Image: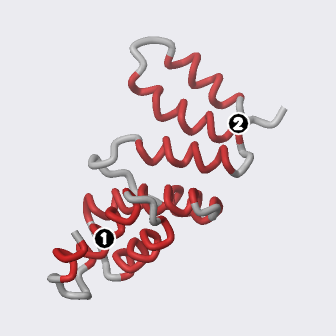
Amino acid sequence: MAALVAERPNEDPDAHFEMGCVYDSTGFEAEAAREYQTARGLGLSGARLARLNIQQASTLRNLGRVDEAIAMLEAAEPHPAIGDARAVFLGLALHDAGRHGEALRVVLEALIPDLPRYQRSVTAYARALTDEQ
């Protein structure tokens, strides 16, 4: 993959994104984070940007940069290419930050639309996780 990416212009955000994916999948997270940031800076867009937001935030979380991961996921726009992945990864990052109630609430709220029943109850329970008592 590195050879294929090397054939692309250095200013190609897709090439940097794909190289980040390779590094990420093979456990080289610091290198992945660098490639993801370069892809973002070069203007990656569309479905790849949506995937980048998830993958870069997950990488940052794994590198112990949880606050950056949370900020990135909170700012990420919804996109059909990722479905509810944003909520799942945000929940994981919030949990790592010690914000357990908020983490569970985010994940539950993502599931509510898909529940065939109990939507009202789960909505109330999710809100109660973070409401001040």
The circle on residue 9 is none
Residue underneath mark 2: 101
- Position of the C terminus by quadrant: top right
View extreme (bottom): residue: 10
Closer-to-camera residue (67/63)? 63
Amino acid type shown at disc 1: Met
Going from the N terminus, do you reach mark 2 or mark 1 first?
1
Which of 37/2 is in front? 2
Residue 4 is situated, as x and y percent measured from the top left of the image, at 16, 74
Q: Quadrant of residue 125?
A: top right
Taking the view exactly as shown, the residue that stands out farthest to the top is: 117
Looking at the rendered structure, the secondary structure element under dot 2 is helix
Mark 2, other Cα within 10 Å: few <14 / some 14–19 / many ≥20: some
| Residue 16 spot, x, y in % from top left | 30, 75
User: Which residue is disc 1 drawn over?
Assistant: 19
Q: Position of residue 99 (x, y in %)?
A: 72, 45
- Whole-Å distance between the Cαs marked 2 and 1? 35 Å
- Left or right: where 2 falls relative to 4: right
How packed mark 1 is, by other alpha carbons closer than 10 Å (few <14, some 14-19, many 20 or more), is many
For this orientation, the residue located farthest to the right is 133
Contact between marks 2 and 1 (CB within 8 A): the answer is no
State which quadrant residue 15 falls in: bottom left
Residue 39 located left or right of residue 63: left
Q: Secondary structure at mark 1?
A: helix
In this view of the protein, which residue sits in the foreground, 117 or 51?
Answer: 51
Figure check: 122 above or below 110: above
What residue sits 37% from the left and 51% below the top?
78
Quarter where residue 53 is shown: bottom left
Q: Nearer the viewer, mark 2 or mark 1?
A: 1
Image vertical order of residue 48 relative to residue 15, above or below: above
Judging from the image, the colouring scheme is secondary structure
- Side of 51 relative to 62 (left or right): left
